[in-house]
Image: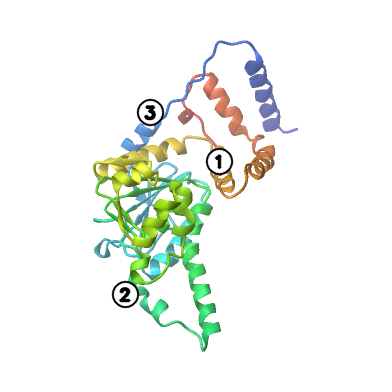
C-alpha cells in the first residue's frame, strides 16, 4: 500500500472515531461565507486561455470562476451564426476544464440579448437547402438539432451556470437562461417568448424547460401564445429568477459572490449534485434514488468528504481546503 493510501485510511479511521464519539459539537452552515466576499473583492478579471470568439468574451473573473459574456453590444447581443456555433465550443471546453467550478453568463451593453439575429440568420431559415419536401425537411431537422445543442451544452455542462440578466431577454434569450441552473436579474429586465410574433413555435428549449422552471403550465401557455413581456417582478414571483437587483452592478456582484461560494465547495459534490438534480427532474423519484445510489457508491469514496468533514469539525471555512481539480 502506498504512503498516500496509508495516510488516507489513517485519516478516515481518525475521523470515524471522532464522528462516532460523544460530542457537543453543533454544525453551523452559513449561507454565504467570507470567502465569497474576499474572492469578489480581490480578484481581477483576466482573459481565459483558449477562449477567443467573435460573439462571446470569456474571462477568468476570479479563482475557479469563468465569466461568459454575450459580446455584441451594438446589436443588443443578437444571436448570429457565430454565436450558435461558438457557444457549443465554449461550453464544451468549460465542461472539460478541471480548473473551472462555476460560470456566470451575462450580456454586454444595454441588454442581455434581443434574441435571434434575423438578418444574419435569414438565409438559413428562408432559403433552405434541398430539392424536395423530404430533403428540405431533413435540412431543417439538422439545422434545428445544431441550434438546440447551443443551449443543451449549458445544461449538460457539469459546472453550475448562473445567468445574470439585465434589460431585454427575448426569444432565444429565454431558451438560454432556462438551460442555466440559477437566474438573477435586474429590476429593468423583461422576458419575452417572442417566437409566435415571427411565425414559428420556439424550438430550442423554452417550451420544454420553462414549464419545469416556473411550474405553471397556464402561465407558460399565456407567455408562449401571446409573446407578451414578463417584467422582473413577475419573473421573481413565478420563480423564473431567484433574486432581483436594482441595477446591473449589484446583480453581477451578487452573481460572482454566489459563484465564489459554490467554487469553495468540493467539485465532486457540486458537480454530482447538478447531474443528479437534472436526472431527477426528468425521471421518477424511484429512478432518481436508484441513480443516486449508483452515483454515490463511488463518489462517497472521495477524499473530499474527509477533508470537508474535518474542516467542519475544526470549525474552519472550506476556503482553507485545497480540493483537487476535477
- Image quadrant in which you'd find residue 272: top right
Total of numbered circles in the picture?
Answer: 3
According to the image, label 3 marks what residue? Answer: 34
According to the image, label 1 marks what residue? Answer: 273
Going from N to C along the chain, the mark reached first, 2 or 3, is 3
Can residue 14 be seen? yes
At 37% from the left and 56% from the top, the residue drawn is: 222
Percent position of residue 59, x then y: 37, 51
Could you tell me how far apart the alpha carbons at marks 1 and 3 are, in whole angstroms?
A: 23 Å
Is 319 located above or below residue 119 in the figure? above
Secondary element at image label 1: helix
Can residue 171 be seen? no
Could you tell me how far apart the alpha carbons at marks 2 and 3 are, in whole angstroms?
A: 47 Å
Q: Quadrant of the N terminus?
A: top right
Q: Is 91 left, or right, of 272 in this rendering?
A: left
Could you tell me how far apart the alpha carbons at marks 1 and 2 are, in whole angstroms?
A: 40 Å
Residue 8 versus residue 69: which sits nearer the camera?
Answer: 69
Percent position of residue 270, x then y: 53, 39
Secondary element at image label 2: helix
Is 171 located above or below residue 310 in the figure? below
Secondary element at image label 3: helix
For the residues labelled 1 and 2, say whether their Cβ atoms are less than 8 Å apart: no
The way the protein has been coloured in the rendering is rainbow
Q: Is 7 left, or right, of 42 in this rendering?
A: right
Q: Nearer the viewer, mark 1 or mark 3?
A: 1
- Image quadrant in which you'd find residue 11: top right
Amino acid at each position: 500500500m502506498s504512503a498516500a493510501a496509508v495516510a488516507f485510511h489513517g485519516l478516515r479511521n481518525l475521523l470515524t472515531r471522532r464522528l462516532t464519539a460523544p460530542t457537543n459539537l453543533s454544525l453551523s452552515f452559513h449561507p454565504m461565507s467570507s470567502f465569497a466576499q474576499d474572492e469578489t473583492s480581490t480578484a481581477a478579471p483576466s482573459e481565459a486561455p483558449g477562449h477567443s470568439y467573435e460573439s462571446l468574451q470569456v474571462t477568468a473573473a476570479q479563482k475557479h470562476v469563468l465569466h461568459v459574456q454575450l459580446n455584441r453590444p451594438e446589436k443588443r447581443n443578437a444571436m448570429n451564426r457565430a454565436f450558435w456555433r461558438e457557444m457549443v465550443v465554449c461550453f464544451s471546453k468549460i465542461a472539460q476544464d478541471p480548473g473551472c467550478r462555476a460560470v456566470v453568463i451575462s450580456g454586454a451593453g444595454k441588454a442581455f440579448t434581443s434574441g435571434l439575429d434575423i438578418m444574419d440568420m435569414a438565409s438559413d431559415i428562408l432559403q433552405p437547402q434541398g430539392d424536395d419536401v423530404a430533403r428540405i425537411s431533413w435540412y431543417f431537422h439538422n439545422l434545428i438539432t445544431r441550434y438546440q445543442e447551443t443551449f443543451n451544452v449549458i445544461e449538460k455542462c457539469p459546472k453550475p451556470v448562473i445567468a445574470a440578466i439585465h434589460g431585454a431577454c427575448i426569444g432565444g434569450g429565454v431558451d438560454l437562461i432556462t438551460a442555466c441552473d440559477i437566474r438573477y436579474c435586474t429590476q429593468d429586465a423583461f422576458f419575452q417568448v417572442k417566437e409566435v410574433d415571427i411565425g414559428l413555435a420556439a424550438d430550442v428549449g423554452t417550451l420544454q424547460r420553462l414549464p419545469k422552471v416556473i411550474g405553471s403550465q397556464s402561465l407558460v401557455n399565456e407567455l408562449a401564445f401571446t409573446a407578451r413581456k414578463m417584467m422582473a417582478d413577475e419573473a421573481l414571483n413565478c420563480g423564473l429568477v431567484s433574486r432581483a437587483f436594482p441595477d446591473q452592478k449589484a446583480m453581477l456582484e451578487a452573481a460572482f459572490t454566489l459563484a465564489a461560494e459554490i467554487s469553495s465547495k468540493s467539485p465532486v459534490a457540486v458537480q454530482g449534485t447538478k447531474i443528479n438534480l437534472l436526472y431527477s427532474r426528468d425521471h421518477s423519484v424511484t429512478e432518481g434514488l436508484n441513480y443516486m445510489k449508483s452515483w454515490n457508491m463511488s463518489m462517497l469514496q472521495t477524499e473530499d468528504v474527509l477533508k470537508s468533514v474535518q474542516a467542519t469539525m475544526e470549525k474552519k471555512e472550506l476556503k482553507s481546503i485545497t480540493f483537487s481539480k476535477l
